[in-house]
């Protein structure tokens, strides 16, 4: 009896990967082995950078809060420490947004914390 091969699933799997490789340059878009490696690497980068994005935004927020707090005469660490002791439950994202878009509101928070 001849060997049974599931060509339907094989074709579907390859078609899915080649569809993901659409837009790539050269053989990366249409040669199965090259496209498979390119898509695998792209997925790896996407996974890694979803984690890195969170770190990058947190550091951006900290820089913005630090700059705004220093204009009011406090360092970032002093400001965050006093914020915690005064039970103001604003996170870094909101504080950075206030510091950028409404400095008067941020100044009011700093005055309340001092």
Image: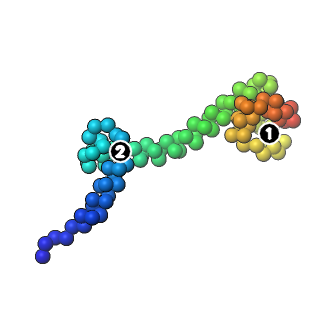
Relative placement, left or right, of 72 versus 27 is right
The crowding category of the residue bearing disc 2, from other C-alpha atoms within 10 Å (few below 14, some 14 to 19, many at least 20), is few
Front one among 30 and 55? 30
Quadrant where the image shows the C terminus: top right
Circle number at residue 83: 1
Residue sticking out furthest to the bottom: 1
The percent position of residue 99, horizontal first and vertical second, equals 74, 31
42 vs 13: above or below: above
The percent position of residue 57, horizontal first and vertical second, equals 60, 37
- Please identify, in this view, whether the residue under mark 1 or under mark 2 is nearer the observer: 2
Circle number at residue 5: none
For the residue labelled by badge 2, is the local secondary structure a helix, a strand or a loop?
loop
Residue sticking out furthest to the left: 1
111 vs 89: above or below: above
For the residue labelled by badge 1, is the local secondary structure a helix, a strand or a loop?
helix
* Numbered label tally: 2
Front one among 3 and 66? 3
Residue at the (25%, 67%) spot, across then down = 6
Q: Quadrant of residue 61?
A: top right
Q: Quadrant of residue 59?
A: top right
Residue at the (71%, 30%) spot, across then down = 100
The percent position of residue 7, horizontal first and vertical second, equals 24, 64
The percent position of residue 11, horizontal first and vertical second, equals 27, 59
Front one among 39 and 82? 39
Circle number at residue 22: 2
The crowding category of the residue bearing disc 1, from other C-alpha atoms within 10 Å (few below 14, some 14 to 19, many at least 20), is some
User: Are the residues tagged 1 and 2 within 8 Å (C-beta)?
Assistant: no
């Amino acid at each position: 009896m001849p060997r049974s091969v599931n060509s339907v699933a094989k074709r579907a799997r390859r078609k899915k990967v080649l569809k993901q490789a659409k837009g790539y340059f050269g053989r990366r878009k249409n040669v199965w082995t090259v496209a498979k490696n390119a898509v695998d690497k792209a997925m790896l980068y996407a996974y890694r950078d979803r984690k890195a994005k969170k770190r990058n935004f947190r550091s951006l927020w900290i820089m913005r809060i630090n700059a705004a707090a220093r204009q009011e005469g406090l360092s970032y660490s002093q400001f965050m420490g006093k914020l915690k002791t005064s039970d103001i439950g604003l996170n870094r994202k909101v504080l950075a947004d206030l510091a950028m878009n409404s400095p008067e509101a941020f100044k009011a928070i700093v005055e309340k914390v001092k």
